[in-house]
Each structure stands twice: as C-alpha cells, then as structure tokens.
Image (spheres, rainbow, N blue to C red):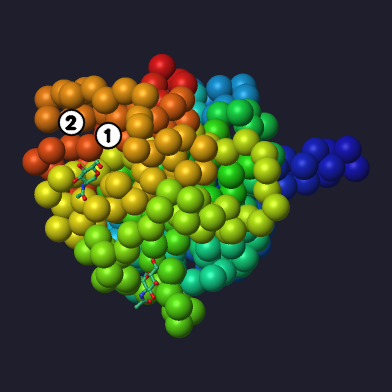
Amino acid sequence: MRLFFFLFALLSSTLTSAAITRGQFSQVTDSWGSNPTNTGFYIYVPRNLASKPGIIVAIHYCTGTAQAYYQGTPYAQLAEQYGFIVIYPSSPYSGTCWDVSSHAALTHNGGGDSNSIANMVTWTTSQYNADTSKIFVTGSSSGAMMTNVMAATYPELFKAAIVYSGVSAGCFYSAAGQVDAWNSSCAQGQVEASPQAWASIAENMYPGYSGARPKMQIYHGSIDTTLYPENYNETCKQWAGVFGYNYGAPQQVEQNNPQSQYTTTIWGPNLHGIYATGVGHTVPVNGARDMQWFGFA
Ligand SMILES: *[C@@H]1O[C@H](CO)[C@@H](O)[C@H](O)[C@H]1NC(C)=O
Ligand SMILES: *[C@@H]1O[C@H](CO)[C@@H](O)[C@H](O)[C@H]1NC(C)=O
C-alpha cells in the first residue's frame, strides 16, 4: 500500500510538470489558468533557478513566435546568469501580431490576450514561488505595443517594463471593435494627444486602480518606417502623464547615452526614453541594459 502511494505520488509529480524541462525552452501544457484567447504559453526555467526567482515576460514581434523571440533575444542566457524565469507568450493569430485593438485586450480582466498573459504570470508566480517585486515585461514592435498594454491593464503585476519600438497603450484602438487590427493612422504617427489625454486612456484600462505602476523605459528609432518615430513622443507623453511628470520639461537629457547616436531623456525615476538616431524598426534588444533597468545587475 505504501509503495503504491509512493509510486502514485512520484508519477503525479512527474506528470504535473512533464512539459517543463529546466534549461530548455518548453511549452506549458499544464492547466495553468484561464486562457480566453488561446495564447501559447512557453517558458524558460533556468538550470540555475533562484530560490525566489524573478520573472521576465518577453513578448514577440509581428510575424514572430515565442520560439523566435527565445532564439533572437538574450533573456534565456541571462536567466542562467541571474536565476529568473522567462515567459514567452505566443500570439494566437495568423499574422501573429498581438491584439492591442479590441476593448477586451485593452481592459483589466477583459478576456483579451493581455488577460491570458497576466494569467501566465500568476500561475508561474505561484508554481515557482516567484518574488513579486521582480516581475517585469518587455517586447519588440507588436510585443512592445503589448508591453505598454500590459503596463496599463495589469500595473499591479509588474515592477518595470521596457518597450522596444512600439506605440502608446490604446493607440491601436479599433472603434469598430476589431480584434488584432492594424491601425495605420497610429502606425504612421498621425495619432496625437496631450499627456493628460494619453494618461486617461491608460488609466481607463483599469478603472479605479490607484496602486503602484511599473517604471517604463521606452526605446524608438528615428528612421522607423513601420511605427513612425512620432510614436516615441506619444508613448513618452502617455507615461509622463500617468506619473505626473512635466512632459515638456524633462529632468535630464543625455546625448550619446547609452551609446553613440542614442539620446536618453529622463523625466523622473519612473520614465526614461531612449531615442536611437539612425535606427529603424526595431531598436535591437540590449540585454545588459535591460538587466540594469530590471535591477538584476
Ligand atoms: C486608430 O486608432 C485611433 C486611436 O488611437 C482611433 O481613433 C481610430 O479610429 C483607429 N482607426 C481605426 C481604423 O480603427
Ligand atoms: C518629438 O518631440 C521632440 C521634443 O518636443 C521634438 O523635437 C521632435 O521633433 C518630436 N519628434 C517627432 C518625430 O515628432
């Protein structure tokens, strides 16, 4: 009888995380929570896992996949170095952009992709006893748009975010309620609003929320012809508005930082913008700098 229970326990503990292998890009097939849009859930749990690990959600670009973003970014190697877990969501749509246009996606617990991604974070946090003060989100292009949306819809989950060449949260909003819609006027830099108006759009994605919000680092290239560079200003306006910074009067502007031709603008501790002159779509991920913004290095 005892042996039976022992074998049963062994078998079930093997089964619960059969799909997740330490040190390998793995798909999470366990029942991990509600997944209203059938978003793919992939994960990298490092061999060198911290006892209370951090989590980085790394969100792919249009035409990308979780696997492509795993291969094309340094987060898995950095996970081995710092002991955090990486979540790679994979978009469920055929063009594999993210839905950042529907009301559902732009609403806390609204049942969109953002909701599915938040549920991945919640599951991973409890499964691995993660440190909730070390949960971060980043992404490129469509993944950068989603990063802004995650920061607006789930501010309570994330401590910091890094946006590589996206648009402000809500800029792709589809008045017709279309899911996963492309919005040319936003992409081409024709949607302009004041910091206060952008802030209200972000704040209305989680009405009544008054707690802490992730600090934001915004990258954009000056010759981006996919998401025009005007989107840099609009995104910085949005978060300046949310944090109550004076958009027109940043604290500091540093030329050639973090590298030649890049300009860092600091509105305050919660908002840094990095404008990359001569860089198109998208600004390359800078893993070492990301580790500093997230506080691992
Ligand atoms: C594009 O987004 C803006 C808001 O940023 C919205 O006013 C406009 O209606 C959208 N365009 C389409 C075609 O949905
Ligand atoms: C962004 O804002 C800066 C500062 O106001 C301005 O000089 C620049 O022309 C703007 N960029 C674009 C692409 O509109």
Number of numbered labels in the structure image:
2
Indicate the secondary structure of the residue bearing disc 2: strand
User: Which residue sits at x=24%, y=53%?
Assistant: 230
Image-quadrant location for residue 24: top left
Task: Classify 10 Å Cα crowding around label 2: few (below 14), some (14-19), many (20 and above).
Answer: many
Residue 31 visible here? no
- The single residue placed furthest to the left in the displayed view is 278
State the image coordinates of residue 217 (x, y, percent, origin top left). 38, 35
Query: From what the image shows, is residue 220 above or below residue 50?
Result: below
Task: Classify 10 Å Cα crowding around label 1: few (below 14), some (14-19), many (20 and above).
Answer: many
Q: Residue 262, labelled with which disc? A: 2
Q: Residue 151, labelled with which disc? A: none
- Mark pair 1, 2: CA separation: 6 Å
Residue type at tag 2: Tyr
State the image coordinates of residue 120 (x, y, percent, origin top left). 58, 50
Residue type at tag 1: Ile
Query: From what the image shows, is residue 237 above or below residue 257?
Result: below
Image quadrant for the C terminus?
top left
State the image coordinates of residue 43 (x, y, percent, origin top left). 48, 45
Residue carrying label 1:
274
User: Which residue sits at x=18%, y=37%?
Assistant: 276
- The single residue placed furthest to the top in the displayed view is 297
Indicate the secondary structure of the residue bearing disc 1: strand
Residue 13 visible here? yes
89 left or right of 61 in image? right
